[in-house]
């Protein structure tokens, strides 16, 4: 059995995102999220350890910009990222997003 490396509980949350990587901007869908990272459902290509910009569409209609490092990649399916340097305000926004949609 594989060991779970995640320290934060993941929540299924399917909302629009857009991300910028080595091939430009892409529209995609967030599949699940935690305070530590998320999985992005996309056919776009990434490289492991690549840092990407990710904008998450909030229920208010505004975008929450985030930076993250790619931790897993499944070609044609999507990728997982670990969020980089969250401020306390950003943690609160993510908590509200998760709790408001779970």
Image (tube, helix red, strand yellow):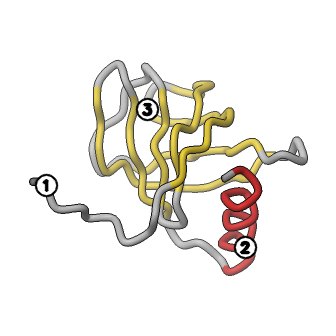
Viewer-nearest residue: 50 or 12 = 12
Q: Position of residue 61 (x, y in %)?
A: 88, 41
- Whole-Å distance between the Cαs marked 2 and 3? 30 Å
Q: Is residue 61 above or below residue 96?
A: above
How dense is the environment of label 1, judged by Cα within 10 Å: few (below 14), some, or many (20 and up)? few
Question: Going 16% across and 61% down the picture, which residue do you hit?
Answer: 3
Which structural element holds mark 3? Answer: loop
Q: Is residue 90 above or below residue 13?
A: below
Is the C-beta separation of discs 2 and 3 under 8 Å? Answer: no
Q: Mark 3 or mark 2, which is nearer the start of the sequence?
A: 3
The residue lying at 59 percent from left, 31 percent from top is 29
Q: Residue furthest toward the bottom?
A: 88
Q: What is the x, y in percent for residue 18?
A: 64, 34
Say which element carries label 1. Answer: loop
Dot 2 surroundings within 10 Å: few (below 14), some, or many (20 or more)? Answer: few
Mark 3 or 1: in front is: 1
Q: Nearer the viewer, mark 2 or mark 1?
A: 1
Q: Which mark is residue 2?
A: 1
Residue at the image position 38 percent from the left and 38 percent from the top: 79
**Looking at the picture, how far across and down is residue 4, in whole percent?**
24, 61
Q: Is residue 33 left or right of residue 50?
A: right
Residue 38, label in figure: none
From mark 2 to mark 1, how far is it between C-alphas? 31 Å
* Residue receiving disc 2: 92
For the residue carrying disc 3, how many other residues have a C-alpha within 10 Å: few (<14), some (14-19), or many (20+)? few
Q: What x and y, as percent, mark residue 1?
A: 9, 54
Asked whether, in this view, residue 64 is left or right of residue 27, the answer is right
Q: From this viewpoint, which residue is outermost toward the left?
A: 1
- Nearer to the camera, 15 or 45: 15
Discs 2, 1 touching: Cβ within 8 Å: no
Q: Which residue has dot 3 on it?
A: 22
């Amino acid at each position: 059995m594989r060991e779970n490396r995640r320290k934060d509980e993941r929540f299924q949350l399917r909302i629009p995102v857009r991300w910028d990587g080595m091939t430009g901007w892409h529209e995609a869908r967030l599949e699940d999220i935690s305070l530590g990272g998320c999985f992005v459902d996309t056919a776009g290509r990434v490289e492991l350890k690549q840092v990407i910009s990710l904008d998450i569409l909030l229920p208010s209609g505004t975008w929450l910009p985030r930076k993250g490092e790619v931790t897993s990649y499944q070609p044609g399916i999507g990728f997982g990222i670990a969020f980089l340097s969250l401020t306390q305000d950003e943690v609160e926004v993510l908590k509200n997003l998760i709790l408001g949609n779970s």
